[in-house]
Amino acid sequence: MNLARVIGTVWATRKDENFTGAKFLVVQPVDDARRATAAPLVAVDTVGAGVGETVFYVTAREALLAYKRDLDHLTPCDAAIIGIVETINGRDPG
């Protein structure tokens, strides 16, 4: 799992049908002190996160499984937000 700060939203009017109703967020990977560690990326939101929140996300196969919508079909997903962070080492994530 990786930490990130949600920095934006992506709107896509045309997408794979399995993403219908999905929310895409731009996330900035961060370390536990909330310093940027890599380039921003787009992740599908599975937990109702919003801009400004610190989240944790998974990539690759784990993301594909986190957003699986149909037992017979895997949705093409490279990154998925799977949690909203409340504290980091006893610190407020905001």
Image: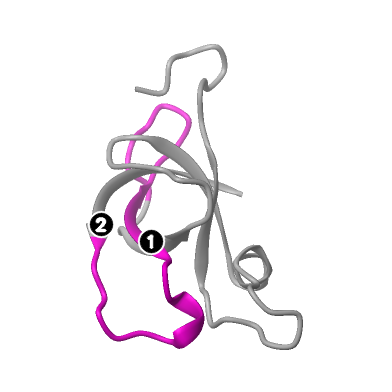
Q: Nearer the viewer, mark 2 or mark 1?
A: 1
Specify few, some or many for label 1: CA neighbours under 10 Å numbering under 14, 14-19, or 20 or more: some
Residues marked 2 and 1 touching at CB (< 8 Å): yes
Q: Is residue 19 magenta?
A: yes
Looking at the image, is 90 positioned above or below residue 51? above
Q: Amino acid at mark 1?
A: Lys
Rendering coords of residue 49 (x, y %): 41, 43
Label 2 secondary element? strand
Chain part drawn in magenta? 10-37
Number of on-image labels: 2
Distance from the alpha carbon under mark 2 to that under mark 1 = 8 Å
Q: Position of residue 15 (x, y in %)?
A: 36, 85
Q: Closer to the camera, 71 or 88?
A: 71
Query: Does the magenta portion include 11?
Result: yes
**Residue found at the far right of this picture:** 71
- The image quadrant of residue 74 is bottom right
For label 1, the residue is: 23
Mark 2 highlights which residue?
9
Disc nearer the start of the sequence (2/1)? 2
